[in-house]
Structure formats: structure tokens, C-alpha cells
Amino acid sequence: MELFLNRVSDGLSNGATYALIAMALVMIFKATTLINFAQGEFAMFGGFIVLVLATERGLPMWVAVVVGMLISAVLAAGIERTLIRPFDPANHLPLVIITLGLFLAINAIAGIVWRFDPRAFPELFPSGNALTYGTATLSWYTVGTLATIAVVSGGLTLLLTKTKVGLAFRAVSSNLESSELVGIKVGPTLQFGWAIAAAVGTLGVCVFVASPFRQLEPQVMVTGLIFAVSAAALGGLDSLGGAIVGGLAIGLVQSIVVPYSPIPNELSLLAAVVVLMLVLLFKPSGLFGTPQVERV
Amino acid sequence: MSDSSAPAANPTRSGERVLDVKGLEGGYGQIQVLRGLDFHVSDGEIVVILGANGAGKTTTLRAVSGMIARTGSVKLRGDEISSAKAPDLVRRGVAHVPQGRGTLPELSVEDNLRVGAYIRSDNEIDADIERWFDVYPVLRERKNQRAGSLSGGEQQMLAVSRALMSRPTLLLLDEPSLGLAPIIVAELFERFAEINKETGMTMLVVEQNAQLALGVADRGYVLESGAIFAEGPADELINDDAIRKAYLGV
């Protein structure tokens, strides 16, 4: 029982990271129906910026995280402007190739600048346990990761529903041409989506490597991205709530189902993908996705 | 409308030319659709451009509002706008209701209206939303529903209200009757005439439904294969034998 509870706790904290990266993917997918395969690498790069700010510039940890999120937002806005916007948004294949190219390029640049060895990352949440039940524990780290996704999803929801730029973003997601006709400049609005996504992703990586059992290295998000894409697809690709449920579900499958089943640990990635396939087979728009509306 | 159309129908009236188009050409890629159109719309007028499928009606409106590449002169109140793009034009007072409604299907009815006021920063936006809810009470009943779940007629009401939320001085309507039941279409056109009468809103409508459109319009143009084939006051066009045969089916 205690082992089971510990696995739940692990699953939730891993799942929270997938959920954060999945939310970043959802922000871009909502606007462009494009999956940014470089999202995990954007996040890893942002994580290194935070690490540099905190350890070499001496900023307090949470200040470093916020500044790092802002810097990654600006970098992503620049990438959107120079590498994404010149291409036809309706033609996905060239854009997918660009995001794959960015994946390789950012990974290589991070390796050149910060080398490929893992580095310790300062803790973001208090160490120790919030709750103890026998040998089962709920660490402050797990509580912190869950609190982070609550704050991020609440913040993004407010941004999208209560602000003018959020309204413009939802309009562009719904219909490009009609958005232009009401005076929305589509390019800068999509750029805003890329910037927000990069900031959320950076936070996701910081939370992930703030675990006392993990370190930051350029490869840190390579498999994480596959889990995050699965999480986003499970949740419906255009739903922030779905990204959270999908992320936590994938995290739990990985830490609970896999150890109790005869699946070798090495195949846990496959287990996540099988869950995804089963859901999409019976519910093609994901758990919480918007079914395609007929555009009359 | 025949009584009120008399002064506006006079092309020599002193009304300022809101829209003045000369030698408009445009199309899609290599395909040239418009072959040098000349037309104008004066302040307060309802002008209709009639034409069959493929005559170039939609292309004409898209060229005017900067959604496709075009050549020729397009003047808005005397200013050349032929290089302006769609998001700039709405800031200059031109609202365009595209063919097929062009609502934002995933957004609520109320958000659709709010986004229509995107270019505004005054504090009368909520009052304007209420005003369109008064004009179309069915939109108030469905204000929290997704626009994509509305019927075709309701979506057209929403699309028109949303366009008017930008407080335009020129409204471009692209075949508002398309796919709607005749009774709904009649109501829509009645409402266009009312809005025109009450607010003096200038309107350029492209339509296939000549009977209804000429019924509310001051003047009309007939478009055929990308060129103007006939023009005149609405009541003359409606009695013109060639046009009656081609477009009114009588």
C-alpha cells in the first residue's frame, strides 16, 4: 500500500511536468494546429538560462525562473518571426520540418554552450515531506509541482478569457480570415502564443529538474517531449485542462501500471503510447478536445 | 423602400463617394477574375452588385478589402487604399461580412461580438453589444453558446452584428442570402434597409438574389465574367427586360 502511494506521488510529479510541456504544446496547437517538436528543447534551453541566472548571476531562484521565462519568451518570439512566419501557416509539412530542425539545432547549441554533462539544479520547493503515512510520503516537491500546474492553468485561462490579447488569440485559433477582418494582426498574435508557450515550457523543465533526483542536461526533454505530446493528444490537443489530465494520466500509467504489469521498464514509453492509441481509437478528438465544428 | 430610394438613386447627388473603384483587376494566382471594374458607392447608399455564380462577386469584395492581390485604383473617401491589407481597412471604417458568415465557430456569441470591437478602445462596447442583442434577441438567448452551434440564419445575424461592432462607415456584405430559407433572407434584407435608414450606414452588397437585393438597394451593377455589364438605379434595373430574364427568372 505504502509503495503504491509512493508510486502515485511519483506519477503525479512526473505527470505535472508532462502537463506543463503539454500545455505549451496546446497553446501553439490551438492557434496553428501545429505541434512544435522543438518545444521540449526550447524548455531545456530556458532551463539552462535559469540555471546560469541562479548560479552564476546569483539571482534568487524564483526570480531566476521568472527572468528565464521572460528571456525564453523573447527568444521564441524571435524564432517565430524569423523561421516560422515566412511560411504559409496552412502548409504544415515545411513547418514540422522546421520544428524538427530547431529540435536538433537547439540541442546542439545547448551542448556547445553548456556541454552535455548533467548539472545539479537548485531546488524550487522545500525539501522534506508534506505528509507521511507509514513509509508512504507525499513530498513538498510533489505538492509544489501540482501547485505549479494549478497556477499556470489558472493564469493561462485568465489570460485567454479576460484579456484582449487572449480574445484575439482565441479568435485567430478559430478562424484566421475572420480575425483579420475584425482588425487582428495574425502574425503578432501567433507570436504571442509562441512566447507564452516557451515561458510555460521553461517553467515545466525547471520544475522537472528541481527534483532532488534529477539533473539538467541537454538531453533532459528528449523523451519527456514524447510523453508531453502523448499527454496533449490524450487531452485533446486544444484543451489546457485536457493537457493537465493527459499529463497526470501518462505520469501515473508510467509509475503505477508499468511496475505492476509484466511490461519491462524500458518499454514504459510504449505503454504511454498504447494508452494514447486506445483513447484516440475510441475518441478521436481526445478526452477534452473540441470536436471539429462544421464551418458553414 | 421605393419611396426613400428616390434621392439616393440620383447618381449626381452631392453625397461624397465613400468608395470609388476604377480599373479594378484581381484574381487568384495566375487566374485573372476581375477585368477592370469601375464602380462607386456614395455616402448613405445601398449599392448591390448582382451576378451569377463565378461572375466575380466575391472576388470583387475581397479585392476591395485587401484580401487578395489587386491592381487598379480603390479610393476610400478620396484616399487611395489599394495597397492596404484587411486588418488596416477595418481601422479605416470598412467592415466586411465574408461569404459563408465568417463567424468564429469556437467562440461564444458574446465573444464574437466582443472581438468585432477589437479595434475599439472606448467604453461603449458593452452598450453596443446590448444594442445588437436588442436588434436580434435570439443572439441574447444564445450569448453563451458557441457560434458554430447556431443555425445559418442566426450565424448571419451574428456575422452582421459583429461587423457593425467595429462601428464602420462602409459595410461590405458578401452574398448574405446564401444557403438561407427565403423568409430568413427577407427578414435580413429588411433589417439591412432599417439599419441603413436609421444610421445612414453605407452598404455594398453582392448578391445573386436580385429581387430582394434590388428591393432594398438604391443602385445596382450587374457583373458578368469579371466585368460590369449593366448599371443603373435599382428600380430601373428591376424593370430591365434583359436583367429580369437573366436574374429574376421571369
Image (spheres, helix red, strand yellow):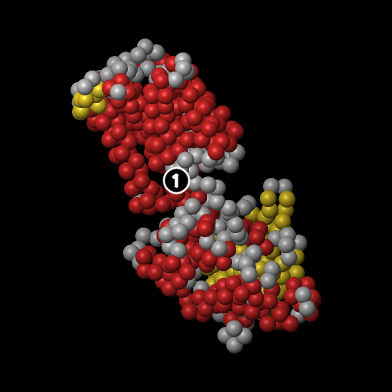
Q: Is residue A136 above or below residue A288?
A: above
Residue A36: x %, y % from top left: 49, 32
Residue B246: x %, y % from top left: 78, 72
Q: Residue at x 68, y 82 (%)?
A: B235
Q: Which residue is mark 1?
A: A189
Does dot 1 land on a helix, a strand or a loop? helix
Taking depth in this image into account, of B57 and A163 the one nearest to the observer is A163
Residue A270: x %, y % from top left: 50, 22
Looking at numbered disc 1 in the image, what kind of residue is underneath it?
A: Thr
User: What residue occupies the far top of the structure in this picture?
Assistant: A117
Q: Is residue B107 above or below residue A9?
A: below
Within 10 Å of disc 1 (Cα), the crowding (few <14, some 14-19, many 20+) is: many
User: What residue occupies the far bottom of the structure in this picture?
Assistant: B3
Q: Is residue A35 above or below residue B222?
A: above
Work out whether residue B116 can be spotted. Answer: no
Q: Where's the C terminus of chain B, which quadrant? A: bottom right
Q: Residue at x 54, y 31 (%)?
A: A277
Q: Where's the N terminus of chain B, which quadrant? A: bottom right
Q: Residue at x 47, y 56 (%)?
A: B146
Taking depth in this image into account, of A140 and A214 the one nearest to the observer is A140
Query: Which of the 4 image quadrants contains residue B55?
Result: bottom right
Q: Residue at x 79, y 75 (%)?
A: B245
